């Protein structure tokens, strides 16, 4: 089980390529199966998309993150509205991958769910941590 920030995203931040703030880049949230393994040197969605889940109601290539914000403070955080899919059959996911559709589908982060999360004829909700999706201290 591994989560992490992709090396490409770190470079994109340092080079002022990515805009995570309100009205910034289109950030996508995708769900992946148990074949996905976080590899920091993967660079784009194409590197991990073969492991994307499928299900009736799931948005292929991920859903756009709504309400994205960057809040500056002692700890600066990137956050967004909880991400929800309405599933009309059964779907299981093991990982969340976040990527920047605006910037060549560059990968941002991979989050290991710590095991299988399943939705059957209901909602699949990613409830982001109150501290933010990504925090920098």
Image (tube, helix red, strand yellow):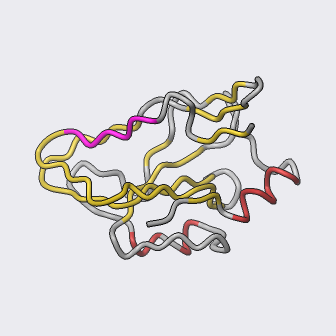
Q: Position of residue 115 (x, y in %)?
A: 30, 60
On the rendered structure, is 79 left or right of 24?
left
Q: How many marks?
A: 0
Is 124 covered by the magenta stretch? yes
Residue at (56, 66) in percent of width and height = 45
On the rendered structure, is 113 left or right of 42?
left
Q: Which residues are magenta?
A: 123-128
Vertically, is 67 above or below 88? above
Name the outermost residue toward the right.
Answer: 15
Of 134 and 101, the residue lying toward us? 134
Q: Position of residue 43 (x, y in %)?
A: 66, 70
The secondary structure that most of the magenta stretch takes on is strand
Vertically, is 31 above or below 66? below
Vertically, is 6 above or below 120? below
Vertically, is 103 above or below 84? below
Is 125 covered by the magenta stretch? yes
Q: Position of residue 76 (x, y in %)?
A: 72, 31
On the rendered structure, is 17 left or right of 64?
right
Residue at (66, 63) in percent of width and height = 6
Picture quarter with the C terminus: top right
**Quadrant of the rendered structure where residue 73 is?**
top right
Picture quarter with the N terminus: bottom left
Residue at (62, 42) in percent of width and height = 134
Residue at (55, 75) in percent of width and height = 47
**Quadrant of the rendered structure where residue 95 is?**
bottom left
Q: Position of residue 70 (x, y in %)?
A: 69, 29
């Amino acid at each position: 089980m591994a989560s992490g920030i992709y090396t490409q995203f770190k470079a994109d931040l340092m080079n002022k390529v990515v805009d995570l703030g309100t009205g910034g880049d289109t950030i996508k949230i995708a769900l992946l199966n148990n074949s996905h393994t976080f590899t920091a040197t993967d660079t784009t969605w194409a590197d991990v998309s073969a492991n994307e889940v499928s299900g009736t109601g799931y948005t292929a290539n991920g859903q756009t993150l709504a309400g994205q914000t960057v809040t500056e403070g002692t700890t600066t955080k990137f956050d967004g509205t909880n991400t929800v899919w309405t599933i009309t059959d059964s779907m299981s996911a093991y990982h969340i991958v976040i990527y920047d559709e605006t910037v060549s589908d560059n990968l941002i982060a991979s989050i290991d769910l710590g095991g299988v999360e399943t939705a059957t004829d209901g909602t699949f909700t990613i409830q982001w941590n109150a501290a933010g999706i990504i925090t920098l201290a």
